Image: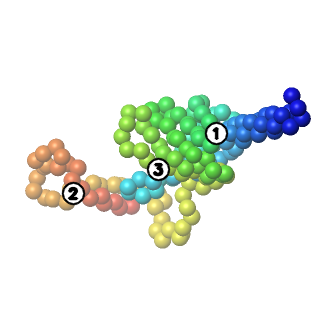
Amino acid sequence: MNVPDILKSSTLALLISASALAQSPTQLPNGPYRGQFQTPNGIVPFNFEVNGSTAFLLNAHEREELTDIQQTGDSVCISIPLYDASLRFHRKGARLTGVYRANSGGTLLPVTAEFGRTDRYESGAAPTVSLNGKWDIGIQRDRTDGPPSKPDDINRRWACSSRKAAA
């Protein structure tokens, strides 16, 4: 082999090595994430945390452990056995974009998540009323012509009313 052939071979080997390193997955950063499902009725926020190869869905004091995180390149799949579903993300920097997919099929829900956020709800205006204390809740139908005639009627035209309970 002559010098130009050796240089070509060395350069090719270096390029292949660099390409392999660039495509190797880096782990998701450990820490909190704030996710959002985009539903037809609006955004539904949720929180989760990543710690190595495990994630935790967070809901108040509940921590649902998710032990199956798969990463390939910029793709991340987190299985959620409790819901027989998965979160499938494309990763770009600190932002994850993808879908929530039920394993039984159905509609894919668009979902995004952002690393480093612990808030669940966006802060907004201060409340104008207080809901502290005990409340009695009454549910009544909006019609007065007797009981529902069909099973489906029970779910139609119901209104909620409430009043502050006596202490």
Reading the image, the residue beneath label 3 is 110
Q: Quadrant of the N terminus?
A: top right
Residue 166 visible here? no
Residue type marked 1 = Gly
The disc placed on residue 73 is 1
Cα–Cα gap, marks 2 and 3? 31 Å
For image coordinates 21% across by 57% down, the residue present is 157
Q: How far across and down, in percent of the image, does residue 62 sit?
A: 56, 39
Residue displayed at 57% across by 33% down: 66
Q: Upstream in the sequence, badge 1 or badge 2?
A: 1
Residue 157 has which mark?
A: 2
Disc 3 marks a residue whose amino acid type is Pro
Q: Secondary structure at mark 1?
A: loop
Instruction: Residue 158: name its quadrant.
Output: bottom left
Q: Quadrant of residue 41?
A: bottom left
Tell which tag, 1 or 2, sits nearer the viewer. Answer: 1
Q: Position of residue 22 (x, y in %)?
A: 72, 41
